[in-house]
Amino acid sequence: MIHRHPVADVRPCAVGDGAPCDFAPLGRFTDKSGKVGEVSVVRCKRCGIGVSMPPLADVAFLYEGRESQDFQPDARGLAHGIKDIAFRRQARTLLRQLGAVPRQVLDFGCGSGQFTRCLGEMLPGSTVTGADFHDAPPAELAGRRYFPIGEARDHAGEFDLVSAFHVLEHDDDPQALLGRIAALAERGGTIVLEAPNIDCIWTRLLGKAWDAWYLPFHRTHFSRPALRALVERAGLTIERDLDICVPTMGRSLANAFGRPNSLPFLLAGIVLHPLQWLGERLSGRPSAIRIIARKN
Ligand SMILES: [Zn+2]
């Protein structure tokens, strides 16, 4: 036995007859948190899902102080303005994909809250709420709607749209997490999930340097079959399954040079984005997968 994982070792594989995944090691990765030490990934030979090792039953300690890049604490001034433009574009794309205007929106795992705020500004007749680990809202959501995910039980069934962008990969037990996310949506409501794609062109070309491995913060690394199986096992109906190009080139470069959130790399990422998009389109291997699902 090359590893022990309390969740991954017993969860049925997305491919095959319900037996657990058949894992092989991908080797050691860089610990971006400096809090865990030796980190590695094992990957299923059948469904392609990747699982970060060692197991971490509770990941809240990784996010204390909002130090991770998920919260992007250093973005100010021009960099903040550029990100606002990008987030407004993402919000427009999301609303187009949904095809209907949601009334009660929850952005689960809102991080810095900048996307949540931009989405709220584009939905003046709706309420948009953020939720994340911390008791207090992030600065972007000061004076706006927010609750800590520890209080999620109090909000069951409240929302006709629950988004969870780049959230599922942050937990050792994404099936249980998706269950808690889905519980927040009303019956007939929409749940939008997005996660990095382990089969993207960049894992092939860049290997372990790909930004979205992001250990130990990313606990699960989804292939499309693995993500679809997770959604279907949650009892949700998949309505759309979309390729998403997450603009990660600037951040990958900035990380490589040890300068997260610095403006020159952000601008380089914008310049390189069309190339990134083209590479993903031509290869058919997107950097992320978005699933729009209905709660029955
Ligand atoms: Zn598997």
Image (tube, helix red, strand yellow):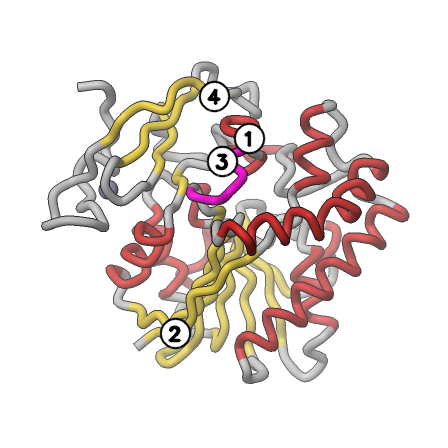
> Is residue 115 left or right of 185 when viewed as pictured?
right
Q: Residue at x 38, y 19 (%)?
A: 27
Work out how far the residue at label 3 is from the one at label 1, CA to CA, in angstroms: 5 Å
Which callout, 1 or 4, points at the residue further toward the start of the chain?
4
Q: Which mark is residue 188?
A: none
Measure how far apart labels 2 and 4 are at the Cα level: 35 Å
- Residue appearing at x 24%, y 30% in the figure: 23
Q: Residue furthest right?
A: 77
For the residue labelled by badge 4, is the local secondary structure a helix, a strand or a loop? strand
Q: CA distance from mark 1 to mark 4?
A: 13 Å
- Mark number for residue 239? 2
At a point 66% along the width and 67% down the height, the residue shown is 91
Q: Which residues are magenta?
A: 199-206
Residue 176 lies, in percent from the top left, at 31, 51
In terms of sequence position, does the residue under pointer 2 or pointer 4 come before the other?
Answer: 4
Name the residue carrying label 1: 206
N-term-proximal mark, 2 vs 3 = 3
Please tell me the numbered disc located at residue 29. Answer: 4
Closer to the chain start, of discs 1 and 2, is 1
Q: Is residue 129 left or right of residue 264?
A: left
Q: Mark 3 sits on what residue?
A: 203
